[in-house]
Image (spheres, coloured by chain):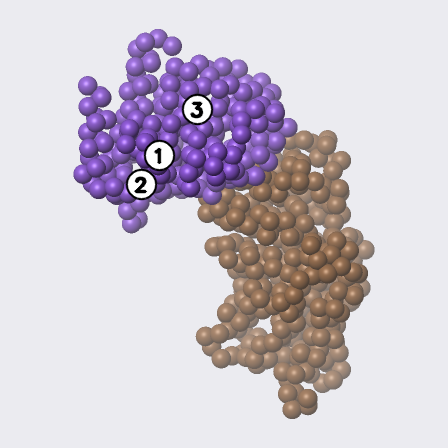
Chain colours: A purple, B brown
Amino acid sequence: MDLQKKKELERFALNIRIGVLEQMKARGFGHVGGSLSVADALAVLYGSQMRFDPKNPAWPERDKLVCSKGHAGPAVYATLALLGYFPYDMLKTLNQPGTNLPSHCDRNKTPGVDMTTGSLGQGTSLACGMALGEKLRGRDTRVFLIVGDGEADEGQVWEACMFASAKRLGNLVLLLDVNGKQLDGCTKDVLDTLDLGAKVEAFGFDTVRVDGNDVEQLYSALERTRAGGTKPYAIVMNTVKGKGVPDVENAKSNHSMTVSTEQWGIWLDALKAQLG
Amino acid sequence: MDIVYDGSMDPRAFKDVLGQTIRQLSADDPDVIYLDADLMSCIGTCQWSAENPARGINCGISEANMIGVACGLAATGYKPIVHTFGPFASRRVFDQVFLSAGYAKNDITVIGTDPGVCAAFNGGTHMPFEDIALYRTIPSATIVDITDANMLISVLRQLKDMPGVKYLRVGRKSAAKVFADGAETPVGPAIVLKEGKDVALLASGIMVHEAMQAAKQLEAEGIGAAVVNVFTIKPLDADTVKKYARQCKNIVVAENHNRIGGLYSAVCECLARENLARVDVVAVNDEYGEVGPQDYLQKRFGLTAGHIRETALRLVRPSAE
């Protein structure tokens, strides 16, 4: 990746983080930790990998994203707003009455959201069905699936992994967001996932491990998935929950946070200052 | 509607008709995809799926994943038809059906075989008396309790093209033949099988045959019993239910299901506002299932023509008790 592309993707990720905080500031609370940890992955996906058209969200040939950790909806919404799927100002309606931006991703409400998620684990099977459907349709589209490490507690994730491998879904790319935390605390304390990379590899995925907050590593890992083939891909992303906002990174509990408008504003200003 | 009921059994087993119909629908409609969770051999689709791996997908013993995969296929424009046994097609996958299919608007058809006592020798663990109750709580779901093989063919062909969550429950053995070969039974309207003025027997599934037998016995005792096949549990044909409530003033609902949450509940909810009739029920009385031959289980759980007759008599001639 050239330096200019790297800077472009890093700036995209920074703008996604700003968009996340804009939503939370307007509402006062939200799933901030897990939204910030996947910002870099979303920037690289939409900034360098995926085929899409914001003017035609239902374009059948588009690549699809299933954010199975549906509570990262605000990060997806920020990405889509920045790409022009809907006006940026709409971000301020997060979780307001009648909004099209609910906490968890909803394909029937938000332009550009490809699948409804929220009940953890279910997005994995949905993505498998979509990838299988694309294959059967003979299309060269790819399906990207973001799963949280806490979410990997769900048995359905592993049913889906078996399926993806057995049905040779080489057009499926699983991005595991290993931020080490879940709602009640650290994953190793709540229910130790052990080595998720070894697990998905054992399930038959072509697996690589990356720093999931490093756009260059994400880019390289995603580029090699273009080869397709007969094995599904897994990118195990080591990330920091709350990445980019030190107070959130350091908070003991950062899955969902409620802070004052002033506090959201201070964090937002710090991010905006990085835009230069 | 061409009714051919004479009490005799259809020589065709449901399981064979189900497998044949799925294969035929796949041949007729390139968007139909059939998914199963290691129970293809139970409905005769195993060999066909092996020969047509893009049309018959074996998901292994992972029902939750199967529902999600079906929903993902629906999002890609396919019309998935999913099969497993009734308990796994309902309570085991309830959240997946509710959210991945219903809430997310991924339209799928779910077939649950061996409902209620039809689970027979698989016993209590496999005996869903609550599948209808669960599906009824899914907004806009369509629920059908199949009466005979010809209805199965007609209804499955309709369901694949209908929007929303569609749940079809059917046994695997044969049932009494009610509808003529080639008959169409449109999903929704209840079907009047027999007229009567004193009591209306509203029945679905295997209880239709029992209701017809009960009606015959009641006629011999001077009681006119109408029999209405309310095979579409949701959306309920409220007009027909109310019509027979007004006409007969007495209603007995007969269903192979817990009395809580099924057809009886639907009928009571429909009639509660207007005091049109007295309603009683022949159904499972809030119990778990158990193992045994189906005829034993029908007696054990009170699901026979005799139970329907007694219940009707109590309504029509309360003083005779």
Q: Which residue is mark 3?
A: A238
Nearest the eye: A91 or A54: A91
Chain ID of residue with mark 3: A
Q: Amino acid at mark 3?
A: Asn
Viewer can see residue B18: yes
On the same chain, marks 3 and 1? The answer is yes
Is disc 1 placed on a helix, strand or loop? helix
Query: Residue B227 at what x, y percent from top left?
Result: 66, 72
User: Label 2 belongs to which residue?
Assistant: A257
Taking depth in this image into account, of A232 and B243 the one nearest to the observer is A232
Chain at numbered mark 1: A
Label 2 or label 1, whichever comes before in sequence order: 1
Furthest residue in direction top, as rendered: A2
Label 1 crowding class (10 Å Cα cut-off): few <14, some 14-19, many 20+? many
Tag 2: amino acid? Met
Q: Residue furthest front?
A: A189
Q: Residues within 10 Å of mark 3 (few under 14, many from 20)?
A: some
Q: Quadrant of residue A241?
A: top left
The residues tagged by marks 3 and 2 sit, at their Cα atoms, a distance apart of 22 Å
Chain at numbered mark 2: A
Q: Percent x, y for residue A141?
A: 49, 24
- First of labels 3, 2 by sequence position: 3
Residue at 30%, 22% (x, y): give it: A12
* Badge 2 vs badge 1, beta-carbon distance below 8 Å: yes
Looking at the rendered structure, the number of numbered marks drawn on it comes to 3
Q: Amino acid at mark 1?
A: Gly
SS category of the residue bearing label 2: strand
Same chain for the residues at labels 2 and 1, yes or no? Answer: yes
The residue tagged 1 is A33
Quarter residue B210 falls in: bottom right
